[in-house]
Image (spheres, helix red, strand yellow):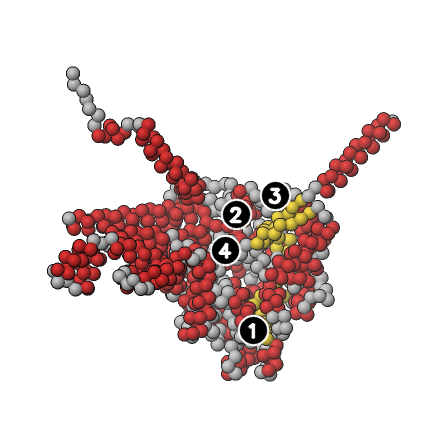
Amino acid sequence: MKRILAILLTVAMMLSFASFAAAEEPINITVFHYMAQATKQGGLDAIEAAYTALHPNVTFTNIYYNQGTDYFPQLSTALSSGDQPNIIMGNPGLYPDLVSEGFVMDLTENETIKAMNLPAGDLGDVSANGKIYGFPIDFKSWGIFYNKTIFEEQGLEVPTTLTELNALQQKLIDAGIDPYVRSHNDAVYGDIECRNTVWTRALAAGDKDVFENLMNGSKKFTDYPYFAEALENWKMRLVGARTDDMSNTQDMGLEVFAAAGAAMRYDGTWAIGDMLSKEPAFEIGFFVAPIDDEGSAKLNVQVDQSFMVNPQAENADVALDFMEYWLTQGIAWSEISQMPLNTGVVSDNLLPMVKTLAEMKGSGNIAHYGDFTMPLSSAFTTAWRTELTAFAESVLTGGGMTVEQCLENLQVAFDEVIALN
Amino acid sequence: MTTIQPTRLDRKRRITVYAVREHGTNLLFMLPAFLLFAFIVLIPFIQSVPISFTDKKAIFAKNWNFVGIDNYVKLLKNKAFLDTFVHTAHFTVIYILGANVLGLIFALMIWRSGRFNNIVRTLLFMPFTVSLVASTKVWSYVYTDIVSPLFNIPSPLGVSSQVILGLAIIAIWRDMGYCMLIYLAGMQSVPKELYEAATVDGAGERQKLIHVTLPMIRPVAFFVFITNMVEAFKTFDQVSIMTDGNPLTNRTTTIVHQIYLRAFVNDYRRIDEASAMAVVLLAAAFLLTMINFKWNRSIDDEGR
């Protein structure tokens, strides 16, 4: 008996030594991301530092590439060369090849995600083929940011109806102030200008499969009246054209806005941190763009930072543990990035605007992208954005494209994608 | 007894120690450059040929099927791809005309002027030595922050119908100094006797230019034309830097840029189609070069 006990104790000691040695083994986690904003990169550093404080043997290497240009090429090269990152930023729905080739971990049964009781929309945004593949950290929305100082000087109130917004724009033009500074060099802007109407109306009408139907060709744009309505609403905002509207990148547009070059800017919440970093004293306000005179507009919500864990990389368990930590203890990230967490957790260090966004999402009176049966795939998103930007170009430069022509162009572009795939 | 003398051909084919020593040294000097070329250009291209006959989507995909010439058939039906040929041709014409005409004019202007020759030559050649990435970035600011507010017009980079012109202007600015130097070298090699003879025949400066200078620098012009054409076909850097992210200008890009987008950018993820495009581009470039050579040779033959 003594001998057995001695052997068991020895084994236990050896195991404890082994685990101690393993715990001390330095581990480096590579995070591949496309967060261009300095504030978000700072937030990532902060959450990693917090994790390293708990696990001193774990360090991080962050690799950033521009999403529109280099991100996927570099990620593809890294994955095919065997130099695999542990954590990959992205919405699984937009990266179907990563899912089909087994480069992302199936998180459907992840206990931490389950315990968070996140809304179905949040989980829908990080799912593909009915399975969860991403950690939904925070959410984004879009609408009209305005310069509070200009509004006060001009005696303007935040508009709640389309008529009020129209009148406000005209008042600014009459006062010699550019109502908007736009950044149509970036493809996303035409897209977010239309989403408010499309998402709100589609979900209200129960058309959760609208994008799926457009992508499989069973429905046309003209079958859904809210696409024309979205373009009409946007066209109403395409007044007071500036010469840089079509050539501004996001950053250039933000610089003009922060320097009071225009009274308003239609942008995403991801830009809040950078707006303030360009001009810390900048007094900005935000409102959801009205879509009619009845106050039907809802806050759009889409998961912003979604991260996937690569099971084929070394130390996948540590990467998974870090992502679970980020999801549950993400306030360190939120306070620096000024991004509202999906969990609804807020702190006093957040801007009042960010807190309000979190509260609005918490109220449930939102239009969530994750509630649609399927997101627009990358090829369709490109076609959609290209035609919308062409519409903006035509309207802003006096080309006079009509809403009907734009819808027709969109349909042709979608039919082309369907035919080629 | 009859001795059969080796023919010239036999002598050529025989590998002698001298030949090995002579050509071996040459080959050794070429080897590093060739290895680099093979590693970066040749091998990837050869690898892309079989991919063009498959349905492989992402570069890291492990499973794919053989689809025959489907990708090539698709390309012929793909308006976006056919448009890239038009855009590339548009860019090539503006760029070659601009760079050559300006290069020639500047070469003629400074050819016999001793006073400002060196300084003008240096100033005009300087853009060619500047990093393309840096100069392209600077040009994007020139368009947006100088040209646009100065003339109260949108930047050409923001108007889809003007993007190609905007890009060609940058390429002309960069390469006209290079063209000028080549033309200048060509002009300096024209025998003075020809000008003296023309003077004796009563030719004026304009006639000397048309009947002596231009015909004599035609081989040089042909060289510049070919190198510029290849350069125009390969245009990628400034297109990528200036238009990435802008969906409209992406739609007006060149062939090589489209190949890159389709091969690597997530919106497309079609390395199979991109490979087919690369093969078609090589065939088109080869064909055009052969036509140019034939044309040049026929002019030479007519001149004899």
Q: Earlier in the sequence, mark 3 or mark 4?
A: 4
Left or right side of A16 for A182: left
Provide residue A216's location: percent of width, then percent of height.
Answer: 48, 55
Per the model, the C-alpha gap separating discs 1 and 3 is 45 Å
Residue at mark 2: A76
- Chain containing mark 1: A
Kind of residue at disc 4: Thr
Asked which secondary structure carries label 1, the reply is: loop
Provide residue A314's location: percent of width, then percent of height.
Answer: 63, 42
Q: Same chain, marks 4 and 1?
A: yes
Per the model, the C-alpha gap separating discs 2 and 3 is 14 Å
Residue at mark 1: A259
Provide residue A144's location: percent of width, then percent of height.
Answer: 57, 71
Q: Is residue A302 visible?
A: no
Per the model, the C-alpha gap separating discs 1 and 2 is 39 Å
Q: Nearer the viewer, residue A84 or A158?
A: A84
Q: Nearer the viewer, mark 1 or mark 2?
A: 1
Left or right side of B230 for A287: right
